[in-house]
Image: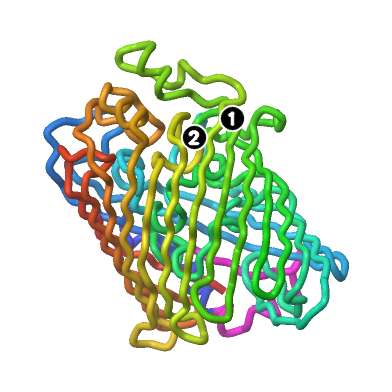
Amino acid sequence: MTMRQIPFAFIRAGAIAATLGVSSLAQSTWPPFLGAQATFIHQNLRPFNSPYEGPNSLTATGDQATTQTYGAYFGSQITEQFQIYLDVELFRGAGVGRTTGLAGLPNGDAVRQGGGDLGQSPYVARLFGRWTLPLGGTEEDTARAMDQIPGKIATRRLIITAGKLAANDLFDTSAFAGAPRTQFMNWSLFNAPSWDFAADTRGYTKGLAVDLRQERWSLAVGRFQMPTEANGNQLDPALSEAHSDNLQLTVNPEQGPLLRLLLYANRARMGNYAEAISQAKPPDVIATRRVGRLKRGWVLNAEQPLSADGASGLFMRWGWNDGQTESFAFTEADRSVSCGGQGRGWGQEDRWGVAASVQDLSSEHRIYLQAGGLGFVLGDGRLRPGREQVLEAYYAWAPFPWLRISPDLQCIWHPGYNRDRGPVRVAGLRVRFSV
C-alpha cells in the first residue's frame, strides 16, 4: 500500500468534525467522546551492505511498508472522584523488514506478530478506571484529550489506576519523546529500550498503579501482568509467578530539569542466556525457560522545557537491565542512552525534532547471538559485536488543527548490534488526522 491509498473518507470526516466542533459530538455519544485519530506511516528501507543474513535479520535488499492505526477514545465521569475510560483501536499493515533485525525498530506504530494471529478486527486497547483523591493545595486545569476528561484537578492528589492499559502511559513518559504518532517514531526514542515493560504484542497489559502527586515531586508504583512467552499475545494470569513491579520517583524543581528515576523488576517464565549457551549449539534460550525468572533494571529520565508553553525542550534517557534473562516484552536491549530535543517550526503548531540513541547488550546476550541464537527480534546467525546507534529527525507540519504531516529520516549504524551489516537508512512520511 502507498500513501496515495489513504482513505479520503477519513480526511472528509476530520474536516467535518473540525468544522462542527468536537463538543457537540461528545454530547451526542455514550460513553462521552474524547477524541479520534487515524495515523498512516509509510516507510522506505533502502538496500544496505549485508555479507550474511539470519532468520531474524533486517531485510538487506530494501523494503517499503505502510501501517494504518485508527482509534476512538471515550471517558465518563462516574462520580466526582472516579472516571472510566475506553479506547478502541484498529491496526492494519506491517513494518519494514518484517519488523525484525533491530533493537530500535523504525516504526513505533508497527505491531510485531506474536504467538498467534492478531486478526484485522477492532480491539479494546484500554479499559480502565481512575480514582482521584484530592489532597489540598491549588487546582490546575485539564484539557480534553485521549484518556483525559476536561475540568479542574487538585495539584496535590492520590491517583489509583486499574484495568487494561499501557504501562508506558504511566511510567517513563516524556513531553518531547513519548508519542510515536506525533514525535519520534524509533523504538529506542519514545521509551528507554532497556526498560522491558510489561506488554502483550500490541503493547498493552492489565494491572494496578498508585501515584502520589505533590507540587514538586511524585511517587508512583505499579504492578502489571507479563506475557506468557516472549512477544506473546496472551498475558499470564498467574500473578504470583509472573508480574512486573515498577517504582518511579519524579522530581520537578522550580529551576532545572524534571527528573524521573524508574526501578523495575520483572518475573516471568523467561529463559537464561548463560544456560542456553552451555546447553546447545546453536543455543536456544526458549529451551531454558523456567517459572519465576527475574530481570531487574532502572531508567533515569530527564527533560528540560525551553519555552513556557512546552513547545520546545530537551530530553535524555539512560537505562540498564541485568541482561541475564531473555528480552521478553518490548525489544532486545540491555543498556541504552538517548538524548535530543523538540522545537517550534515555521507555523504556530509546527514541530521539529532531532534525537540520537545508543543501545548495547550484556555479555551473555551478545555471546548468545554470536553463537547463532535467536531472540524475538534479533538473530543474524552470527555477530561481529557493535553498539546499535540511531539518529532520527522529523518535521511535523500542521496546516490545520486536525491534520499533521511529518516527513521523517532515520539512520541506523550496526543494526542488531552487528558491525558487519549496515548502515541502514529509512525514509518515512507520517500523516495523522485527529479530532
Q: Are marks 1 and 2 in contact (CB under 8 Å)?
A: yes
Q: Identify the image quadrant of residue 73.
A: bottom right
Residue found at the very far right of the displayed protein: 79
Q: Which residue is mark 1?
A: 268
Q: Is residue 254 left or right of residue 190?
A: right
Q: Secondary structure at mark 1?
A: strand
Q: Which residues are magenta?
A: 16-38
Q: Is residue 212 left or right of residue 82?
A: left
**Rendered position, 180 above or below 266:** below
Residue at image point 57% right, 85% down: 19
Q: Is residue 21 highlighted in magenta? A: yes
**Rendered position, 180 above or below 385:** below
Residue type indicated by callout 1: Ala
Q: Is residue 335 highlighted in magenta? A: no
Label 2 Cα neighbours within 10 Å, binned few <14 / some 14-19 / many ≥20:
many
Q: Which residue is mark 2?
A: 328
